[in-house]
Image (spheres, rainbow, N blue to C red):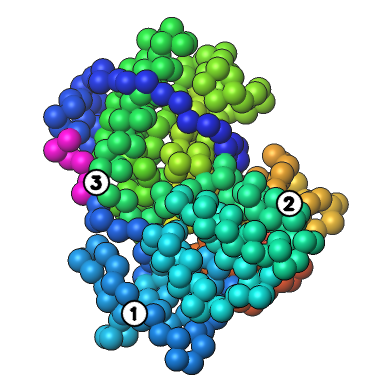
Amino acid sequence: MAYAVLKHTGCHLRQMIETVTEGFVGSAAQIVRRMRVVSLCGLLFAHMPCVADQRDPAEGRVIKLTLPIKTGQATGTLTSYTPLLFTLTTEEGQQHRVLWNAIPADKVDRYWRYLEQPAGDANGLFELGDILVRHQDGQALAKQAFDQALALDPTLAQAIEQSLNGKEPDGTPRYEGNADPAMWGDLTEDVMQKGTETLHHFAQRTQRELSINLNLYESDRFILLTDTDAKQVASLSVKLVEGYRAVAELLGDDPDGNVFVGKCLVVLFDNRVDYIRFQNQLHETDARGTGGLCHGFGNGHVHIAAYGRGNSRQTNHVVVHELIHAYLRRYRTPQPLDDWINEGLAEHLAHQIEPPPGNNIYLKSRLLLEGKKGLGEGFFEGKNLHAWQYDIAGALTGYLIDRSEAAYPKFISAIKEGKPTEEALQTVFRMTPEKLTLRFKQRLDRELNKKLGG
């Protein structure tokens, strides 16, 4: 159920039908009137925890600047920075974290050269190029920095090639889909409206290519395209709202806000064959063996697709699980989360919102781990979590939240800002993966003993 990263496609759609649940609208005029107005701002974050590789400007190197924020403008001094973002501190002491990609590329180049003084330093110039190559307008300046670095140290050629391909120097992906970080954070009203229109284009293409009679329901945050009956639509619509509020409240976001680029597209088919055909034709994805997928795109869009499971609770559970993936994809930055965190929070909240019939996630996890070392092979290795480990990841996430609901969003935010997962775990929860595994399995043993005792 992890998100795939694919190219974006689409055509135009204005066909809508009358709502069956409160909040879903049925006319273009209503959509425009209810469109959420978002401040003209780049990627600005307030009151976020410290990040890895944080640096302070050298004495005497002062940068003062003014940036747009939700309430108007913020004027202050650049007080610390990393290769991902910098801190803007106002005279009143308020701090805002700002991604480098949120300001013009030429200013990124000028400010970084002023702060780091990288002339004659091959690694410093490579670092500048690596920052600029992630900027939507930074390609020319990135090449200039890379050329200067290469002239000083030819052995950087491979690292530069990896950076140009959207990867870390060791070859691992930096952002899924070579994401454009400028499409994260607060977006302008124009960007939000165009995002919604793009989803309408894709919806019409879906109807045209699949030749299926799909109805479109629309709310402030979701576009639901489906051939299921009105009862399933009503049930799922409620669960989408509940799922969004749950993850937003847990992570300290506005539960009435909208993290999506325009909206989130949810495509729900009545049968599995149409779902697989849709994934193959519209997303170039082999979806056999899956009940639902979340597709996250480099331009910030997210699509959810699933098929009806013959049981409303099971169907809603799968879609809410994918919704949490969509939210995490859009949360703060495009930096991906390890599978055990991504799948874990999705499964934890899906169990809270719409638990599948007869499923005690803690007891099931204890039985799944019977006779196994740790939490199963490769659990903490980042990607490719096995399907049987999803419930375990969900139970582990619940355990972390139970330990400290206030600490959990700090853990997620630290990773989203670029801190390695194990470092974030140690910083926020004061645990290594080994210690976490030990404490968690003790909790599972208590659940089993409770069941046996009952």
**Mark 1 / mark 2, whichever is N-terminal:** 1
- How many angstroms separate mark 1 from mark 3 (CA)? 28 Å
Report which quarter residue 442 is drawn in: bottom right
Q: Mark 1 points at which residue?
A: 64
Q: Dot 3 surroundings within 10 Å: few (below 14), some, or many (20 or more)?
A: some
What residue sits 45% from the left and 91% below the top?
A: 60
Q: Residue 258: give its label.
A: none
Q: Does the magenta stretch include residue 36?
A: yes
Q: Mark 3 points at which residue?
A: 189
Q: Name the residue under label 2.
A: 171
Q: Dot 1 surroundings within 10 Å: few (below 14), some, or many (20 or more)?
A: few
User: Which residue, as the protein is rendered here, is positioned at the far front?
Assistant: 151
**Mark 3 / mark 2, whichever is N-terminal:** 2
- Camera-side residue: 327 or 442? 327
- Camera-side residue: 127 or 49? 127
Label 1 or label 3, whichever lies nearer to me, is 1
Label 1 or label 2, whichever lies nearer to me, is 1
How far across and how far down the image is residue 419, in percent? 60, 67
Q: Dot 2 surroundings within 10 Å: few (below 14), some, or many (20 or more)?
A: some
